[in-house]
Amino acid sequence: MNSLTLMLVGLAMVLAGYFLYSKFLAKRIYRLDPAFTTPAHELNDNVDYVPTNKFVLWGHHFTSVAGAAPIVGPAVAVIWGWLPAFLWVTIGTVFFAGMHDLGALWASVRNKGRSMGMLSGRYIGKRGRNLFLVVIFLLLLMVNAAFAVVISNLLISTPSAVIPTWGAVLVALVIGQMIYRWKISLPLTTVIGVVALYGLILVGDRFPVVLPDTVLGLSAASFWILVLFLYAGIASMLPVWLLLQPRDYINGVQLFIGLGILYGAVLLAQPTIVAPAVNDAVPAGTPSIVPLLFVTIACGAISGFHGMVASGTSSKQLDKETDARFVGYFGAVGEGMLALGAIIAATAGFATLTEWEAVYSAFNEGGVAAFVTGGATIVNAGLGIPASLSATILATMAVLFAATTMDTGVRLQRFVIQEAGELAGLKIGKVVGTVVALAVAMGLAFGAGADGAGGMVIWPLFGTTNQLLAGLTLSVVVVILLRKKRPTLPVLVPLVFVLVMSIYALVVQLGTFYANENWLLFGMDIVILVAALWVVLEATIAMVAARRGAAEDESADTDSERVGS
């Protein structure tokens, strides 16, 4: 099949979702109100609560939720064939991810920027809230520990990405000053930032940074992981306008330029997809496509982590409630476009089926490496950009997204720790909360694996935990809608599907962990499974009560307590 056809059909589907379906959700389901006073204005503290231009906030939200997952998931899942991955990404983006992200953002904005964990306490109950927070904590732990390993591996395998990766931090700091202190126009600021970033990519390609085998007594991988954690901790405590917003914004612009390069190369080269539409000859040991496809591809179809970002940071920066459609739904569309690009790169970036099968010789092969290698081949063929520079562009794109997710992930983990402290009657400050978040993630990374790679030990549970959290987030949204006597079908159908697939996957993995005598993952799987079933039960009871109760007044959407600042 010609990859150009796949690209055009996929782009048409996800863009139609934004221009058509998101309007329906905004008007009929969530009923966004431009006159509603958002938490960014009501609780403005110039640190976490900051009214933000919707384009800048979109950049923060999009790059924070994207990370490496919409590349890794699709580039692994094509082992079952390109068609299942393509359908799940496109349909999931339109009817699942966009609706989920917009709904989580709206629900949080209507409750003073509270996280989904705290909202579950109000709308589901205290027991449900406590179990919800357990799932959230474990998910953020997986993200923070594992993404540090992913970035470290990319900095080692693609040393040309080192200079642009760290240079982007300086660029972001300058952009923050240009927007908020020097009041320079956003278009001019954007041009300057993009030129600076791509100038760094050219410099990095010319001067790759290769660390020695040992740095300060640590392996190169351990050194990068330690530096990444220290950076993420500092970044998570800075005011959002100083680094987080501008870094995420310029990375978002950079992604669309990178996607433009990839899609432009596909348009000109029109490479053939060598992978089968449905792979009937998967390698031995490959799990069943159902339910594993739906948890292998999370970001790019639907992801619980998005709800954490939407309710943890984005809701505190939303200038107008009507901006939620662009920030939330179009943020999911951008991620779907990235996942589509990953599918094309991982299936059309190889010369022959035999070459593709050599890469996908086992489950969990491919991933970022297949995206970078295959994408570089397509860009080189279509645009004539040297393969090494093409690989640098794509690797830098992946690293910058993963790094922005770490920034946000540590900040969100700090919020969760502060919220848990409040529930226990303790007031945990910003610094202490951040130190605890880093200590837990670094303890996992360095205490359970060689070269600081312990974060990957619990990674096999990420997909199921992530999708499970998406289902639990949707359950909160359904309860809110029921209380307001609004239609719930657009939320309820995805909710049931995601919960069934997630719980099914947890059960399947439970058997695998038992057979492999992996008692750590077996025990964690049981904890997550029990917590999930309990929350589902509590949520069902809350839904029944909400359906029978009187309609909730719109003025009852907010309360006076403030969390996470």
Image (tube, rainbow, N blue to C red):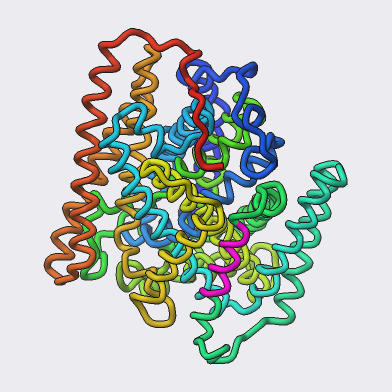
Q: Nearer the viewer, residue 261 or 249?
A: 249
Q: Position of residue 467 (x, y in %)?
A: 34, 46
Quadrant occupied by the C terminus: top right
In the rendered view, would you say 345 is above or below 56? below
- Closer to the camera, 27 or 85? 27
Q: Position of residue 388 (x, y in %)?
A: 65, 76
Q: Hey, which residue is sitting farthest top in the picture?
A: 550
Q: Is residue 204 above or below residue 87?
A: below
Residue closer to the observer: 225 or 157: 225
Residue at image coords 30%, 71%:
362
Q: Which part of the image, by quadrant, shows the N terminus?
A: bottom left
Can residue 497 be seen in this snapshot? yes
User: Residue drawn 41% across and 64% down?
Assistant: 440
Which residue is drawn at the image coordinates 54% and 22% (left, top)? 23
Looking at the rendered structure, the number of numbered marks drawn on it comes to 0
Q: Position of residue 419 (x, y in %)?
A: 43, 43
Q: Measuring 37% from the left and 52% from the top, which residue is drawn there? A: 137
Specify the segment rendered in magenta.
225-235
Q: Is residue 549 magenta?
A: no
Q: Nearer the viewer, residue 490 or 176?
A: 176
Q: Is residue 224 left or right of residue 243?
A: left
Question: Height in image: 432 above or below 424?
Answer: below
Q: Is residue 231 left or right of residue 501?
A: right
Q: Visible in this render: residue 83?
A: no
Q: Position of residue 316 (x, y in %)?
A: 59, 36
Q: Quadrant of residue 155?
A: bottom right
Say if 526 sits above or below 180 in the image.
below
Q: Say whether residue 232 is magenta.
A: yes
Magenta residues, dominant SS class: helix
